[in-house]
Amino acid sequence: MRIRNVVAQAGRLRRVSAEASRRHGYGRLAAAARARRLRTRGGFEYDEALAAGLLDPAIDERDALRYVSEFDTTRMLDRLNPALLADVTAEKAIFYRHFAAAGVPVPELYGIVGRAGGWSARSGRPLLAGDVAGLLAHETPAEFVVKPSGGHHGLGVRVLRHEGGELVDLEGARTTPEALAGELLGDPEFDLFVVQERLRNHPDLNAVFDADALQTVRLTTFVAASGEVQVLHGSLKLAAGGGNVDNFRGGATGNVLVEIDMPTGRLLRPRAPDGTTPPDVEGRRLPDWEEAVALAYRSAVLLLPQRTMGFDVGLTPDGPVIVEANRGYDPFPSARFGAVVRAIARATADGRTAEVEAAG
Amino acid sequence: VRPRALASQLSGLVSTAREASRAYGVPPLRVARTARRLRRTGAWEYREALAQGLLDPACPEEVRRRAVSRHLRREIQTRLNPVSLEPFTEEKVTFNRYCEVAGIPVPALYGTVGRAGGWSAASGRIVTDGDAFAAMVARDLPERFIVKPTFGLLGLGVQAFERRADGTLLDSGGRALDARALHARLVADPEFDLFIVQERLRNHPDVEALVDTPVVQTLRLNTLVCRDGGVRILSAQMKLAIGRGDADNFRSGETGNGLCDVDMATGTLGPLTTVAPGGRGAVRHDALPATGRRVTGWRVPMFEEACGVALAGAPWFMPMRTLGWDVAITPDGPIVIETNNYWGMSYTPLGPEERVLFLTA
């Protein structure tokens, strides 16, 4: 088994170093050596280092090691968030109802459907399999969203609009309520879906980057031993990929990440998967920034004893709305975020508030 | 595997039939035939049928017909309650907080403790070690409180405490312990890694007068959300904590506690049901064996209000359609201790109409 692992690792290293060599224009051996060092010293998987751009020789290796690996992030998360409470946030049919009842702005829920059961919020009635198409056709407004209750990374999210008896998603794919109901009820991976309000971007946000998909802010919170809530990191996902979602998924969606200067709510330098920089983004201030941060403070307390969370906040014309809470969030590929994770780890060990060192 | 399963089934049938034959004085073949029929028509396990008293020749056929086996009940519950939403009701931190904001009366949540994480609701502080827990006990908790596993069931791990003037804690058995020692015990618990700390409720004075124990007595109300969205109570039982421990759970009789059916129309109790000797069927008592206080005909205080809480609460958990609500009757009114998505039934079958509703929901 161990030998098989070593062989698999070697295969990955060969593939990743070849890709890094092609992408960044330097030797395969040098790329492989760098990937090995990042793995042994920083815990970065080869693919992870490649996706985060850490194999680019233009980045000083010492700076690359200021980023944080998924391994180190997960270790920190496991320590702070009881695994038993994972479904409080991961299962959206639970999360949305909890937060809505608590008076936290979340997308309005029209119903829950799937082979595991169903419910119409409007009528209060249970939905049997034969009722799902009816809900999709008649109990939803002109535009709405369907997503797996237990989904992640934007998988299976559909943003739909009614058009002449059909449903059309943001990529232009057409279906009917009946066909969609059949798909949802027969989905091999997810047995429950939420049908909910489609949120729109605040016009000031679309002025930064115009997109149909909701572009959310990710706010990372930490609750110190004293009970003080800290909002330590912020980033914006720009839906540049043209799909239904703004998720980055290691660059696979074509979307763009931008870190936010926390005190001012101004955007820093964007980070596109292809290394380009979308124009006119850096320096722009996000709308309702203070309100969004205040919402994260309030939400973090509601999820105790889970101590750290990545909240996805939609900046809408009606104010900030919590779209998701992620207890097992991915590391943001930056030295700034690395400093945040290290600060949380130190604060957890010494029982103080997190003090984030300047990323340099 | 199949021949082995068949051999095991056969051996179970033989031993059950022999035991029932000895207990009831009837030929084993006759019992075996009844057990086989119950298994074939209602998915009853042989031992389960024996424990429920269905192999007693005196058991009316009508009762056998109306009773719902554990297998069949769970099959329906799995169909009616999405498994992925189980934590909604079974994980008690989430459940308590959701009920609080939904306006469903629940015991106050004081915080959590355990190796997976600790937190005090009053101060908002994180409870990381024994000293922090001792500070929480001294500063943030009232004199009386309950500790129970967040993902526990059947009353397992429920512990009631009272803080004395010198700061030490007394458990319900009168044993004293230090808060740090309790913390050490909880974080080392081999089974549960997170416990909630919550309000210790008191029984309504009428309930206290009946049972004479500080252990909270609860009503079990099993609800069903019907296809039209209306909510029905399928059955009501009162659990009486006349056994040992800090909870009133029945656990197939192993706790020594008893059950009484509640007449839905009047809110009065039927006879107390306890497990018959040998675990075969039940014994009914009109009065509590220890005190002689009459239970049959005793009216549950605030019964309509308790039903109202369950009926109003059920839609909040949709699309979970059938839940078993444990409701304590306290001086301040009915308070929901917990709900159960896989609720059980002992000895009393559902009413004819309720049975049809449940089976065809």
Image (cartoon, coloured by chain):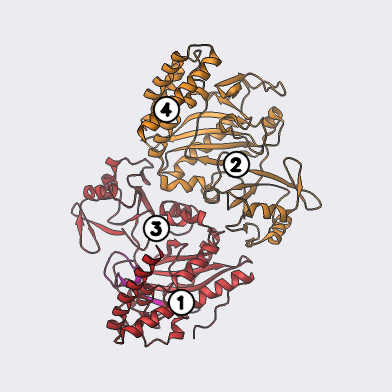
Chain colours: A red, B orange
Magenta region, residue range: A241-258
Q: Quadrant of residue B321?
A: top left
Sequence-first disc among 4 and 2 = 4
- Please name the predominant secondary structure of the magenta segment in the image: loop
Question: Which residue was labeled with disc 4?
Answer: B9
| Letter of the chain that mark 3 sits on in the rendering | A
Label 1: few (<14), some (14–19) or many (≥20) C-alpha neighbours in 10 Å: few
Q: Is residue A148 left or right of residue B268?
A: left
Question: Does residue A65 appear in the picture of this structure?
Answer: yes
B78 or B7: nearer the eye?
B7
Q: Amino acid at mark 2?
A: Leu
Marks 4 and 2 on same chain: yes
Label 4 neighbourhood size at 10 Å, few (<14), some (14-19), many (20+)?
few
| Local SS, label 1 | helix
- Give SS at disc 4: helix
> Where does label 1 land, which residue?
A40
1 or 3: tag closer to the N-terminus: 1
Kind of residue sitting beneath label 3: Pro
A135 with respect to A344 (left or right): left
Decide: is B78 above or below A55: above
Q: Are marks 4 and 3 on the same chain?
A: no
Q: Name the subunit of mark 4.
A: B
Residue B250 coordinates in the image, percent (x, y): 58, 32
| Residue type at tag 4 | Gln
In the rendered structure, which amino acid carries the disc numbered 1?
Answer: Thr
